[in-house]
Image (tube, grey):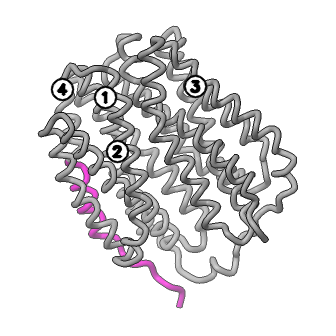
Amino acid sequence: MRPNARLIVLLSLGHLVVDLNQGSLPAVLPFLKAAHQLSYAAAATIVLAANVTSSLIQPLFGYFADQTARRWMLPISVLLSGAGLALTGLAPGYGAVLVLVVAMGLGVAAYHPEGYKTATSVAGDRKATALSWFSLGGNVGLALGPPVITGLVTALGVAGSLGMLVPAAVVSLLLVAVLPAFAQAPAPRVARAAAAHGVNMPGAMALLILVVSIRSWTSLGFTTFVPFYYIDVLKADPRLVGPLLFVFLGAGALGTVAAGPLADRWGPRAFMQWVFLAAIPFGLLFLQTGGLLAFVMLGLFGAVLTSSFTVSVVLGQAYLPRNAGMASGLIVGFAIGTGGLGVAALGWAADHYGLPTALWASALLPLAGFVATRFLPAPRDAK
C-alpha cells in the first residue's frame, strides 16, 4: 500500500503551523514584558504555562487518541493554537495573556498525538518516511516562528501578533476539507507481538526523563532569556530576536537530522552521554563572544544540544518496550514540559542576580545532564 502523499503533506503543514505558533512565543515575550511591565519571573511563568499545557498533558491526549479516532481535533487544534498566540497582542492584562497562552498550549497538545496517529494511518507501507516528513513540518515551524512574529510585531506593534491567525485559519480550512479522506483511512493496528519482546525498566525510564528534562531546561533557558539578554543587557535592536532564535532552533532541527547515523554507530546511550558534554563549550563561548561569532556559537550550541531529541525517544521506547506509545508521550511531552518548571526558577534568578547569571546557569546545566546519563543502564531483553 502506497502512502497518501497529499494527506501527509497537509498533516505536515498543520504541524508546521502549530509549532510556528509555539515557536513564536519566546520571540514575542520581550514585547509582552514591555507592554505589561512584567518581571522576568512573570515572563518565565508565561513559558511555564505554555509548557504545562502543550507538553505535560500531551500523554493524556495521546491516551484519548489511542482509544478512538478524533480527526476533527486536527483543524480545531490548529485554529486554537493560532488564535491563542495571535490574541496575546490584544490581551488587556497579564492574566489574559496566561489564559491565551494556555489555549495555545492546548491546541499544540491536542494536535501532536492525533497528527502522529493519522499520519501513520495514511502512510501505507512507508511509515518511517511519512513520519519523518510529518516531523519535518514541526521542526520548520519552530524555526520560522521567531522571525515571523518578530517581523509582524516590529512592523505593526504588539497587536501585529494578529497576523498569526492567517496561516492558522487557512490550514484549518484545508484540514476540514480533507476530513472525509481521513475518515476513510484505516486506523493503525498496535503491534502487540512486538511488545512481548523486552522488559520494561521504569527506573531507567525515570532517569531518562530527568535527563531530557535537563536538556529541555537548558534549551528553554536560552530561547526564553537570550532575547531579553540582547535587548535589555546588550541594548541590541529588537529585530535581532527573530534571527537569533531562528539560528538556535534551526540549527537544532539540522542537528536532529544529523544525529541519527551517529547514534546508530555509537549506540543511543553513548551518544546521549557525550552530546551533553560536547554542547557545554559552545554555550559558554556564546556568552563570551559577540557579533557573527556569537551567532555561530549559538547555532552550534543548539545543534549539539538538540541532536539527542530523537535518540532519547528511541532509548525511551527501549526502556518501555511493552508501552512504546506511552514512552514517546513521556519523552516528547512530559519530560520536555517539565523543563518549563526550571525556566520559572531561572526567571527568579534573573530578577535577583541578573540575566547573565540565568544564562550562565543554563549554559552549565548540560554538565548535570552528562552526569545523569552516566547512570543510564542498557535496555534488557526478555528472557
Distance from disc 4 to disc 3, alpha carbons, whole Å, reads 32 Å
Which residue corresponds to mark 3?
164
Residues in magenta, as a range: 364-383
Side (left or right) of 290 relative to 137: left
Residue 219's disc number: 2
Q: Nearer the viewer, residue 79 or 13?
A: 13
Image location (x, y in percent) of residue 38 = 35, 15
Image location (x, y in percent) of residue 50 = 49, 33
Which is closer to the viewer, label 2 or label 3? 3
Image location (x, y in percent) of residue 196 = 63, 81
Image point (52%, 8%), residue name: 92
Which residue corresponds to mark 1?
227
Amino acid type at circle 4 is Gly
Q: Which element carries disc 2, helix, strand or loop?
A: helix
Which residue corresponds to mark 4?
354
Image point (43%, 34%), residue name: 48
Amino acid type at circle 2 is Ser
Distance from disc 3 to disc 1, alpha carbons, whole Å, reads 20 Å
Distance from disc 1 to disc 4, alpha carbons, whole Å, reads 14 Å
Pick out the residue farthest to the front: 292
Side (left or right) of 282 relative to 34: left
Circles 4 and 3 in contact, beta carbons < 8 Å: no
Circles 3 and 1 in contact, beta carbons < 8 Å: no
